[in-house]
Image (cartoon, rainbow, N blue to C red):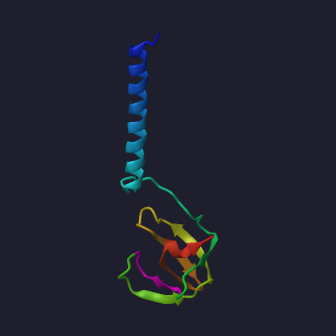
Amino acid sequence: MYNWSSIKKIRWIAYTILAINLGLGLFLISGKAKNIIYHKYVDGRVGYIHAKRGVKLRQEPRADSNPISNIGNGESVTILNDTSTVNEGWVQIKYRRSTGWVWGDYLSK
């Protein structure tokens, strides 16, 4: 009635596909896929700051870098270089006459 050999083979293939998909999902979630370049913003476009207390425009893409100025909530900025994947979340922007870095999570299109 049933060909158990074929059923076992199909079950084995299904489990293998499931394991590969699960492994790939864990790889992407774990952050080991950091070297995959993904640009959230388009260079040269306008973005907006979304932070209740504003953000600091920094000289370098680091939280301990010296602040250049403060940017208020809702202010428009020009995205110069979206390297958020390479610089672990930092995006280079121009605000008025100053060029610096802000954390990408505080930007929106």
Point out the image quarter for the C terminus.
bottom right
Classify 5 as above or below 87. above
Q: Residue 54 in the image: x percent, y percent? A: 53, 86
Quadrant assignment, res 46: bottom right
Residue 92, horizontal then vertical, whole percent: 50, 73
Residue 83, compared with residue 8, is above or below; it is below
- Relative placement, left or right, of 95 versus 33 is right
The answer to whether 78 is drawn above or below residue 66 in the figure is: above
Identify the residue at horizontal 42%, vertical 33% (top origin).
17
The stretch of residues the image draws in magenta is 54-61
Q: Residue at x 38, y 26 (%)?
A: 12
Residue 58, image quadrant? bottom left
Spot the residue most to the top: 1
- Percent of width and height locating residue 2: 45, 13
> What percent of the width, then of the height, locates residue 50?
57, 79
Q: Residue at x 58, y 79 (%)?
A: 49
Whether the magenta-drawn stretch holds residue 56 is answered as: yes
Q: Considering depth in this image, is 91 or 54 the residue closer to the camera?
A: 54
Q: Residue extending furthest front?
A: 1
